[in-house]
Image (cartoon, rainbow, N blue to C red):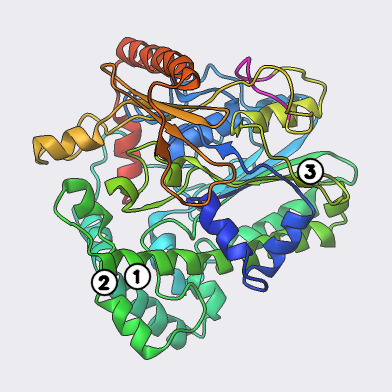
Amino acid sequence: MVLVLDCVRADLLEAALAEPGTLPFLEQLRRESLVFPAAVSTGSWTIPSHASLFTGLYPWDHGAHSRSGPLLPPGPETIAECLGRAGYSSAFCSGNAYVQDATGLSRGFDEALWGGGREFFLRFLGIPRATCPDLGRAGPVHVLPSDREAPSPLRQWAIDTLSRAPAVWDGLNRVGARLLGTPAETARAVCPWIEPSIDAWLGRQAPGRPLFLFVNLIEAHEPYLADAGFGVSARRWLRYARSRQDGVLWVRGQWKPTPTEVASVRRSYTATLRTLDRRVERIVQAFRRHRRWENTLLVLTSDHGQAFLENGTMYHRFRVDEPICRIPLWLRAPGGRPSGERPGAWVSLIDVPRTLAGLVGRNAFGDASARSLLDPLDGGAARPVYAMTDGIGSGEIPTARPDWRAFLNRLEVAAYRGTTKVVAREGGAVEAYHVAVPDRGVPPARAEGEPEALELAALARGAVATAAERIAANPYHGSVERRIAGWGY
């Protein structure tokens, strides 16, 4: 099983785990897992990083990013296809509407479910079924809007407004939950059908058949409710209500969050970790009910982190800074043998499919540098791992100030090795830093001119040059963006 806690960054998860009893299930799960404190995402937002998670390739190799069009092309083999050929039954449950059939990310799965826009906002409805299709079962399914279908202006206005004034959204969910009698946890969960769908899928599987499950839980993605299902005082709610979480206007350069607003958003983000703790526990309970848990290899990770105005960036996507690149990565082996941390070696999302492929005898999968997380990773020549940010699509924020657009529209690659990180930008600019393992949320110190930085800079420049060359060779297409926009994204 691969379990993605969307937008969860490494240092804030570890800080929450350091407070006993805050995340009781994840605390126990961490004790049973191999923990990789030097884990890096390959991308700064959903589609590039998930494509790497499924193919074992870096974004410039798999081609799923905003500059070419956010679509995984049919060429790269996915880990679901690999395991399917080996006899595995597979299922895909995503709360993130970007992780779905239209973006090519469900390719190879026998069954696939993903959430829609109303599930993210109108949580009090407790929607019992996915609003998008189960690809592996007969019967009518919802279809994505065609390329010719324009996004709904009314829907987009509603979503923008709810993001801009989250107290309206939060209040709607509170009042709606009371009127319908929806339990608080369900009224705060995105896509509460995920756990029962997993339970039902497990019940349909033949005993002894190997299974592969992918899950994306998206509570930690902005915008945020006040309490994530846990009570808050009226005073704290009013303070939340006066705040904004306006990612739309931030991207346009029209919202400059105040320190108070940033602190409010960060508190609400941290509260989502408690909801995620309970949801992960319920998924594991389903595996236990079907006598599968003790034989399950679990990878728990994230697609990227989340920034709260560190280095001038809010939320994610536009930079390769530490709050966005550094992610949790745990591996629980069957039987839950106590494992502990494995510090000292940088690991990447490209290592996850390589690890799973090794279960069916594949000694290589994806990028040539990918390694199995079950093998010793220290010793020998240290390899670099990379993260890429792809800027903005060709038609995004056309009215933004030129300086702000330049800030967001960067093609950058970060390379990590040893205690050094180098960020190379298209056009030749390079920055070097000292980075710590594990990440403690402290801004990295500059490291220009040091031998390790100079060597790593050459690798980062080569990676960004390769990315720029391949992007130029693949004309941009916006069809996927239009189809997803039809759902209100």
Mark 3: which amino acid? Leu
Mark 2–mark 1 Cα distance, whole angstroms, equals 7 Å
Mark 2: which amino acid? Ser
Q: Is residue 130 above or below residue 107?
A: below
Q: Are marks 2 and 1 in contact (CB under 8 Å)?
A: yes
Q: Which residues are magenta?
A: 365-372
Which is more foreground, mark 1 or mark 3?
1
The residue carrying mark 2 is 243
Percent coordinates x, y for residue 475 in the rendering: 29, 16
The residue carrying mark 3 is 297
Q: Are marks 2 and 3 in contact (CB under 8 Å)?
A: no
Determine the residue located farthest toward the front in the rendered image: 450
- Quarter of the view holding residue 349: top right
User: In the rendering, which numbered label is found on residue 336?
Assistant: none
Q: Nearer the viewer, residue 87 or 312?
A: 312
Q: Are marks 1 and 3 in contact (CB under 8 Å)?
A: no
Residue at coordinates 77% horizontally, 18% vertically from top-left?
363
Q: Going from the N terminus, do you reach mark 2 or mark 3 first?
A: 2
Q: Nearer the viewer, residue 204 or 255?
A: 255
Q: What secondary structure is found at the residue carrying circle 2?
A: loop
User: Visible in this render: residue 458?
Assistant: yes
